[in-house]
Amino acid sequence: MREDTEHGNVAFLGVDGGGTHTRGLAVDDSGAVLHACEGGPTNPSSGGAGKALGNLRALLVELREAALAKGCRPVAACVGQAGYDRPEDEAVFRRVVEEALPGIPALLTNDSHIGLVAGAPEGYGVMLVASTGCIAFGLARDGRRARADGFGHLLGDEGSAYAIGLEALRTVCREFDGRGPQTALTGAIYSHLRLGKAPDLIEWTRRTGRAAAPIAALAPVVFAAWKQGDAEAGRIVRGAIERLCDAAAAVRVRLFGDAEGEQTVPCVLGGGMTEDAAFFEALSKRLVERAPDLRPRRSARRPVEGAVDLARREWRRLSSLR
């Protein structure tokens, strides 16, 4: 998308809502950027519902006001939200969106959907998001959808940054007790959290409110130890990769069948974990080993741009009904 000084008179708003941070984008009808912004986490399961929904409301208001300030009337919005999966989520998020964007049609969907729209111009494929949480989402050529995992950090999110961080903490506790091998993770995590010994982790988890984000933030510490050859870190990373592959493979089979070699399926990798080059390479390699028809790739565009695309499509759909 291009930055410009002359804009059309309508605007489309897009939001990529996550468990760590959230991005917003407003563009005019020509695709020129009117405003881009970032905010805090908007996934209620990551840091508390009140704070998360407040962050979403503030970001939507900022986008709306910025578009209006440049003479463009917002006509549609799309919020791609991590943690948006169940019918009950619709009412919660819909209320916030309607308060922030009164009278503006808004499409609510999962963040993996907007990532796939941004990264797969073919119009079909699998999106694998590996971040604080994780989910695999797919679109078939005929419009059918499927998903796997995304059940939140208590029930699922296997292979996520949270899962990696939690297993690292458990590994440190096992070494402290003598129930597990020595690992470089112990010193690295003590240093990162400024703690002295494993029992201090009990108080640390209490202070964090057992939220997902602080534990997920330990994933880069694990990646660093993995790259330095630590066996336990390697075990944790390999396990996460297998669980992510499980989710992608499940979606692939449900939407594209089990006949390998007869077709190729775009597989867009997104989320903060895939920004690590070594992890991206290892995950891509394992995906192809397990499903040779998958074609892992990075998206050439940001998920928030996929949200804007969906907002534009929603506006056109509604306009055609008038």
Image (cartoon, helix red, strand yellow):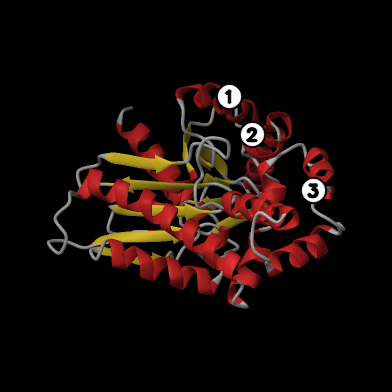
Front residue of 163 and 59:
163
Relative height, residue 4 to residue 303 (above, below):
below
| Whether label 1 touches label 3, CB < 8 Å | no
CB under 8 Å between callouts 1 and 2?
A: yes
Q: Disc 3 designates what residue?
A: 201
Secondary structure of residue under mark 3: helix
Query: Can you tell which of label 1 and label 2 is closer to the viewer?
Result: 2
Foreground of the two, 122 or 5:
122
Frontmost of labels 2 and 3 is 3
Q: Which residue is mark 1?
A: 92
Mark closest to the chain's N terminus, 2 or 3: 2
What distance separates the C-alpha of mark 1 from that of mark 3?
Answer: 34 Å
Is 191 on the left-hand or right-hand side of 247? right
* Image quarter of the C terminus: top left
Residue 295 visible in the picture: no
Q: Residue at x 72, y 38 (%)?
A: 210
Image location (x, y in percent) of residue 180 = 64, 58
Residue type at tag 1: Val
Callout 2–callout 3 Cβ contact below 8 Å: no
Identity of the amino acid at label 3? Leu
Q: Position of residue 156 (x, y in %)?
A: 50, 40
Which residue is tagged 2?
44
Q: Quadrant of residue 313?
A: top left
Amino acid residing under circle 2: Pro
